[in-house]
């Protein structure tokens, strides 16, 4: 069985230059080999020479939402001040793991911010397009905004469990029961539509 992989961080001393030769992802200083990347340590033995020590990253590195990126998220909970969401996609790229985000009441719409009510904009399990406006802090993680016409709810289900159809910028209707529910509806751009 292969030995478990050793992970290292930038600046970590790996070994002496007398024991091995520095490979990719490493550098030498004062007779020692140090890691220049966060990754997995690899040691390749060469014939009649010192082994080559290198540090390699995971080939599928995790994509992170950055400020200004349009993200697709799912609403988890709402209260009178904000909606808590899980970020699922950055652009059209799915994330390996979800990130938490918050859409504050004042970031829902660009106009009439004082009249916005969170429960009339989002409901739990809605799929929302939003823009990252700040990386936030340890509690709220990413701060998101839907204060553009192209951002807001793109998929919502009615209380009957049927996917609703947008009928205006602030309402969606259930095709089965014809009941209307308030939402901050996104005007979806063609680049975000996938078949």
Image (cartoon, helix red, strand yellow):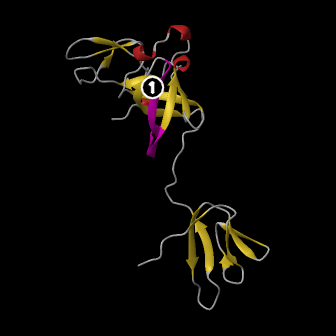
The residue that label 1 is drawn on is 189
Q: Is residue 97 above or below residue 131?
A: below
Residue 34 image offset from top left, x and y in percent: 69, 69
Query: Visible in this render: residue 123?
Result: yes
In magenta segment, residue 19: no
Residue farthest right in this picture: 30
Q: Quadrant of the C terminus?
A: top left
Q: Is residue 12 left or right of residue 192?
A: right
Q: Is residue 145 above or below residue 139?
A: above
Helix, strand or loop for disc 1 = loop
Name the chief secondary structure element in magenta: strand
Instruction: Magenta stretch: give its range.
Output: 81-99
User: Residue 172 falls in which quadrant of the image?
Assistant: top left
Residue farthest left in this picture: 176
Q: Quadrant of the N terminus?
A: bottom left
Query: Visible in this render: residue 184?
Result: no
Q: Is residue 18 left or right of residue 70?
A: right
Residue 140 image offset from top left, x and y in percent: 54, 33
> Which residue is at the front of the view, 139 or 124?
139
Residue farthest bottom in this picture: 48
């Amino acid at each position: 069985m292969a030995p478990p992989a050793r992970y290292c961080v930038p600046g970590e001393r790996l070994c002496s230059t007398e024991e091995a030769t520095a490979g990719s992802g490493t550098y030498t200083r004062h007779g020692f080999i140090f890691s220049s990347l966060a990754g997995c340590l690899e040691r390749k033995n060469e014939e009649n020479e010192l082994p080559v020590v290198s540090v390699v990253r995971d080939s599928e590195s995790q994509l992170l939402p950055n400020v200004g990126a349009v993200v697709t998220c799912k609403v988890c909970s709402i209260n009178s001040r904000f909606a808590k969401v899980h970020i699922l996609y950055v652009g059209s790229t799915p994330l390996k793991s979800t990130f938490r985000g918050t859409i504050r009441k004042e970031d829902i719409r660009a106009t009439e911010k004082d009249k916005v009510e969170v429960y009339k904009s989002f409901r739990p399990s809605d799929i929302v397009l939003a823009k990252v406006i700040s990386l936030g802090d340890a509690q709220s993680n990413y701060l998101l905004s839907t204060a553009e016409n192209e951002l807001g709810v793109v998929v919502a289900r009615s209380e009957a469990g049927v996917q609703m159809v947008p009928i205006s910028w602030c309402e969606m209707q259930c095709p089965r029961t014809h009941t209307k529910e308030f939402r901050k509806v996104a005007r979806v751009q063609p680049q975000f539509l996938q078949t």
